[in-house]
Image (tube, grey):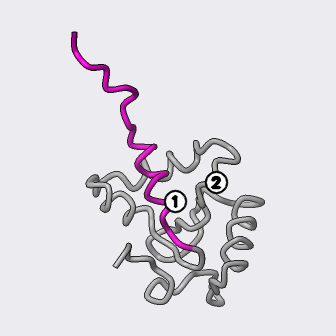
Amino acid sequence: MPDNPGPRETFYDRVYAFVSRVPPGKVVTYGQVAQELGAPAASRAVGYALHNLPGESGVPWWRVVNASGGISHGSRGPAAALQRERLEAEGVRFTLDGRIRLPEYRWVGES
């Protein structure tokens, strides 16, 4: 009788696990997450995963920004304001044009 390997880890599960490791005060980009997960063309899928994140999951979704250090265009209104508020509460500062200086705040993984 074959072993039952249990539920298979999905791409979304892998996104959530990676984003959960990003420390407070640091950010990653959608493309960076995709690259780290071995799917460099899947930055949109990373965005979809975070958009479908179950409420109260504990995954720090607000630490993921776009490639130019901005809050995603899909996050407008209250979601964008909440993302900025949470990042600022962690010490992340925005430029006058609403971007994060990625060389200063980007997380490059455990070193």
Label 2 crowd bin: few (<14), some (14–19), many (20+), radius 10 Å: few
Q: Which residues are magenta?
A: 1-23
Residue at figure coordinates x 70%, y 48% from the top left: 56
Query: Is 60 inside the magenta-drawn segment?
Result: no
Q: Secondary structure at mark 2?
A: loop
Residue 72: x percent and y percent? 57, 63
Q: Quadrant of the N terminus?
A: top left
Q: Is residue 44 above or below residue 30?
A: above
Task: Identify the disc placed on residue 20.
Answer: 1
User: Is the Cβ of the residue at disc 1 closer than 8 Å to that at disc 2?
Assistant: yes
Residue 38: x percent and y percent? 26, 55
Label 1 crowd bin: few (<14), some (14–19), many (20+), radius 10 Å: some
Residue named by callout 2: 58
Q: Is residue 76 above or below residue 95?
A: above
Residue at figure coordinates x 53%, y 68% from the top left: 65
Q: Amino acid at mark 2?
A: Gly
Residue 23: x percent and y percent? 53, 72
